[in-house]
Image (cartoon, helix red, strand yellow):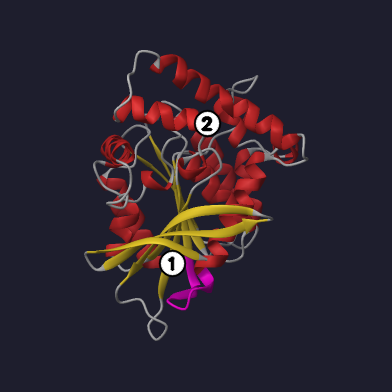
Amino acid sequence: MTVLAEESRDGYSCKLIEYKAVGDERVQSYLLVPDAATADEPRPGLVLLHDHGARFDIGKEKLVRPLESAPQHIKASALQWAQDGFDGVFLADKLAAEGYVVIVPDALYWGSRSTPLCRQWSRMQFGDLPSEDIRAVKKEVYEGQRAVYDSLMQRGVVWAEQTLNEDAAAARLLASLPCVDKDRVGCFGWSMGAHRAWLLGAFCDDVKAGVALCWMTLKETQAQPPSASDYSMMIPSLRERYDFPDIARWLSPKPFLFLNGNSDRLFAPDAVQEAFDRMQAIYSKSGGAGRLRTEFFDGDHHCGLREQETILRFFKEEL
């Protein structure tokens, strides 16, 4: 792990780090470390996983307030995202202030791993470049997801599986830090981040508990053919054999909280409820009864202040 930059914040530090994740792939992450977290008094750790949102210029910055040294257009983009999705809160900073050691990695095609064209769009939207062609640029960036998927598949690599392996590498790194209690490591994600969180919880032993906000449904509700945005989340070998709630087979008996808005425009509540019921049945049959919480909140596809307090209570209870 290499520390690229660091700044002190109110009760914790924010480090920009880089490390080798899978093969020769290097990943940048933010690592937030409370001042009170030491080898003598290790703290619980959290892997926070950013969403999709068809916004690729930022990844880790969707959850962490960017460093002061970050480009102005990235700081503006991140602030707008926090205001729209999180009621103005950078959730990783909030959790670090509560005493958690937090790591937030960039997924492939987001943030530091986005494309020059994506960075051009960001400067057009939030910075100093003329914006006459911004719609065409945005469309090209969005459709570029198909090319990423195809280029990886030509090498026998599934994009979402690579992301899962990289997220697991982030969890392993977090658990290895002397200031982290390796038996109290959890994960959280909203939207695509929730999809990443339940995959990580299911297939990574370093993660002991987690929260998935606004990504659970039935396979029959998914559009066919898939949209460009679906390519970053498809693992064909899983989708061909299983439905989404079947993930509970591998999650159980880990404590996990699934939340969804009762007016979520992306995930129909009836399908979500059916998926929740199937997951609860799997947990009950596999010795995990009472360790899976599935709840609806009043609202849309959002991670607002009320939901944040629910998430914080869960982690305080479980970690």
Residue 153 spot, x, y in % from top left: 74, 35
Residue 314 spot, x, y in % from top left: 38, 60
Residue 131 spot, x, y in % from top left: 34, 18
197 on left or right of 261: right
288 on left or right of 194: right
Question: As displayed, is residue 161 above or below residue 225?
Answer: below
Q: Which residue is pictured at 29% across the width and 34% down the height? A: 84
Tell me the kind of residue under disc 2. Answer: Ala
Q: Quadrant of the C terminus?
A: bottom left
Tell me the kind of residue under disc 1. Answer: Gly
Labels 2 & 1 near each other (Cβ < 8 A): no
289 on left or right of 3: right
- What residue span does the magenta drawing correspond to? 175-185
* N-term-proximal mark, 2 vs 1: 1
Q: Which residue is mark 1?
A: 45
Residue 290 spot, x, y in % from top left: 50, 60
Q: Secondary structure at mark 1?
A: strand
